[in-house]
Amino acid sequence: MTETGDGRRPLNTGTAHSARVYDYILGGKNHYEADVAAGEAMIEVWPALPVHMRANRAFMLRASRYLARECGIRQFLDIGTGLPTSPNLHEVVQAVEPGARVVYVDNDPIVLNYAQALLASTPEGRTTYVHADMRDPDAILGSPGFRATLDLDEPIALLVIGMLHFIHPSDDDHGLLRRLLDPLPPGSYLAATIGTADFAPQEVGRVAEQYASEGMPMALRTHEEAAAFFTGLDLVDPGLVQVHKWRPDAGDEQVRDADIAMYGALARKPR
């Protein structure tokens, strides 16, 4: 199922978009000249950016697999999905539980154009794409796709990966996240990654300036500021850490701390 919300915008290929820049740096194919130019400019000021972005995605894969395998979660709400990159979230969790259900949400029209790749669910499960913006939680939670796919009587994993540093405090960042979390039942989880300049302040600061020059201002946060997004939730060990340090797979420990500008954590909504 695919649906669009009131926030749908015409496709603008002349302006870089964070989802397409991310796709380019990860080695994808769904981007345009403006995204390539922006990505190259960012890599020039911080050559570790591809390592950082791969570590962010690897966190998402590990956390989602943990949620399905260790926590028994069968429902997932992925905000800021980005362009399809295999393995996608539903491929990971349905490999553990074929009946898992996933709602993907993004506001980039090009993601909508490629959404069919996100809908290749197992027969037992279900995937839905909702075209909406995180800044409008009511449009997400009230969408027919969300209501038809996820059951609010059962725990849901909310994934906000690589998104919160694009949501500024002036946009009521904590309020937006709470409006998404509050309707979810106890036993639900939040998995989130949050940009920071704590480990390479000069380089990451220049990348943030480059994003801002492309019309994508960022709000980088300290560890304390990032931790505030998990207030009232029970953090899963090892807590809020750089993404490559969260339950790493073999080889992840070889990544240098200075090459990672993202905190990540998984936390449970108490019963």
Image (cartoon, rainbow, N blue to C red):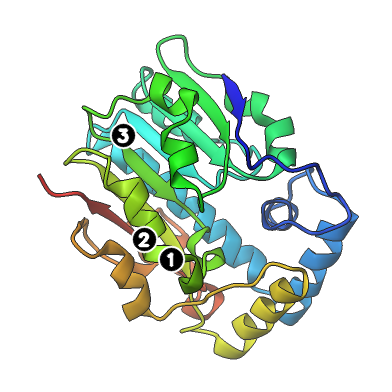
Nearer-N-terminus badge (2/3): 3
Name the side, left or right, on which 41 lies relative to 233: right
Q: Residue at x 53, y 75 (%)?
A: 219
Q: Which residue is mark 3?
A: 68
Label disc, if present, on residue 175 of the rendered structure: 2
Q: Nearer the viewer, mark 2 or mark 3?
A: 2
Q: Which residue is mark 1?
A: 172
Q: Nearer the viewer, mark 3 or mark 1?
A: 1
Could you tell me how far apart the alpha carbons at marks 1 and 2 are, in whole angstroms? 5 Å
- Marks 1/2 in contact by CB < 8 Å: the verdict is yes
Q: Could you say which is closer to the camera, residue 173 or residue 65?
A: 173
Could you tell me how far apart the alpha carbons at marks 3 and 1 are, in whole angstroms? 31 Å
Q: Could you say which is closer to the camera, residue 194 or residue 229?
A: 229
Can I make out residue 264 in this image?
no
Q: Secondary structure at mark 1?
A: loop
Position in image of residue 265 (x %, y %):
33, 60
